[in-house]
Amino acid sequence: MTMSLERIALKRRLLDERRVMRRSGSRVEFVNACEICGNAVDALDLHEVIISRGDVRGNDELLRKVTESEYNVALVDKRCHTDLADTDWGHRLLTDRLIDRYGSRAILSWITMLNLKAPGDFLNFVVARAMEVEKT
């Protein structure tokens, strides 16, 4: 998939917003880090978390909304993207991080706004993850 200008802008914005503070000796710096392993890396991929590209295949408008929303996208390094992001564990972890960052209500509203034919599985998953996040 060629990155649209909107997706490039989203990635730039998320790289800026999701920087993490790291200490190196007496120096403090802000770095880009993988949202799965936490390693600081220069190159991060965008990964669709809650609703995948495959879930909206054939609908270009929904594809754009799913791939260009901060409520559905995580920044991951190449290794984690390949090995972990699409596992059940990775899916739960990244969903929990999105809920921590934006809140379940905002994510549920975004899913509802998409007007999917069958949003129930996505809504139920976010609600279940939100209940788990609140327990911790």
Image (tube, rainbow, N blue to C red):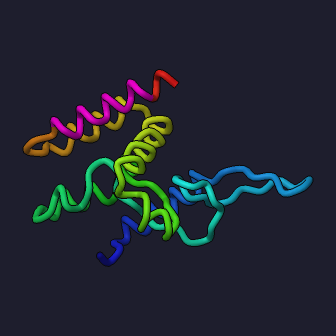
State the extent of the magenta-drawn residues as a range.
120-132
The percent coordinates of residue 26 (x first, y second) are 92, 53
Relative to the observer, which residue lies in front, 110 or 125?
A: 125
The answer to which image quadrant residue 61 occupies is bottom left
Residue 26 appears left or right of 64: right
Magenta: main secondary structure equals: helix
Query: Where's residue 87, x and y in %?
Result: 36, 54
Residue sitting at the far right: 26
Seen from the viewer's position, the closer of residues 93 and 99 is 93
Residue at x 46% of width, y 23% of height: 134
For this view, does 109 lie left or right of residue 90?
Answer: left
> Residue at horizontal 48%, vertical 42%?
97
Q: Quadrant of residue 7?
A: bottom left
How many labels sit on residues? Answer: 0
Residue drawn at point x = 35 percent, y = 48 percent: 88
User: Where 128 sits versus 71, above or below?
Assistant: above
Quadrant in which the N terminus is drawn: bottom left
Q: At x 57% / y 55%, what residue is drawn?
A: 37
Residue 8, x across and y down, in percent: 43, 69
When asked about the image quadrant of residue 57, the answer is bottom left
Outermost residue on the left side: it is 117
- Indicate yes or no whether the magenta region holds residue 8: no
Hey, which residue is sitting farthest bottom in the picture? Answer: 2
In percent of width and height, residue 105 lies at 35, 29
Q: Is residue 126 magenta?
A: yes
